[in-house]
Image: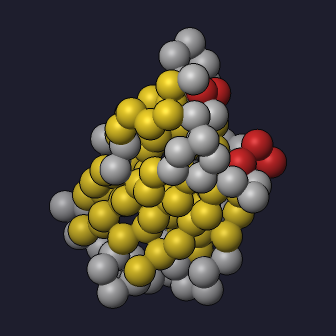
Amino acid sequence: DVQLQASGGGLVQAGGSLRLSCAASGFTFYNYAIAWFRQAPGREREGVSCISTSDSSTFYADSVKGQFTISSDNAKKTVYLRMNSLKPEDTAVYYCAADLWGLCSLRTTSPYEEWGRGTLVTVSS
């Protein structure tokens, strides 16, 4: 079975950092797109960042450019999201998702066939 396991969320003060992990299993991992989305209470799910596991191309939402860094360890089948200078507005449930065709998109959730259970990030002011 294809599975994505997100972890690393928690409570952090504003200005702090967290690193989220998305561990994949059940597929080869190479040549896929792995993205992070987040959903705050009462808001739509929004794309945050995406990485292509074939060539390590990365994409970021404007709101997190320079603040978040996505990376992958193909040997471990894990994608990371390093989040620095966290703000209260970064509070959300963060989900990782896989597009098995390898196409990154942050505008829509539609291309992503597999989703992990979210991990909650809470940033206190």
Q: Residue 73, percent across and down?
A: 41, 80
- Number of marks: 0
123 or 68: nearer the viewer? 123
23 or 86: nearer the viewer? 86
Residue 58 in view here: yes
114 or 23: nearer the viewer? 23
Q: Residue 8, percent across and down?
A: 34, 50
From what the image shows, is residue 32 above or below residue 46? Answer: below
Describe residue 106's horizontal placement relative to residue 33 as left or right. Answer: right
Identified at 71% across, 63% down, the residue is 59
Identified at 69% across, 54% down, the residue is 67
* Furthest residue toward top: 42
Residue 90 in view here: no
Identified at 47% across, 75% down, the residue is 72
Q: Residue 99, percent across and down?
A: 50, 61
Describe residue 52's horizontal placement relative to residue 59 as left or right. Answer: left
Q: How is the protein colored in the picture?
A: secondary structure
Identified at 30% across, 64% down, the residue is 23
* Quarter of the C terminus within the rendering: top right
Describe residue 6's horizontal placement relative to residue 14 as left or right. Answer: left
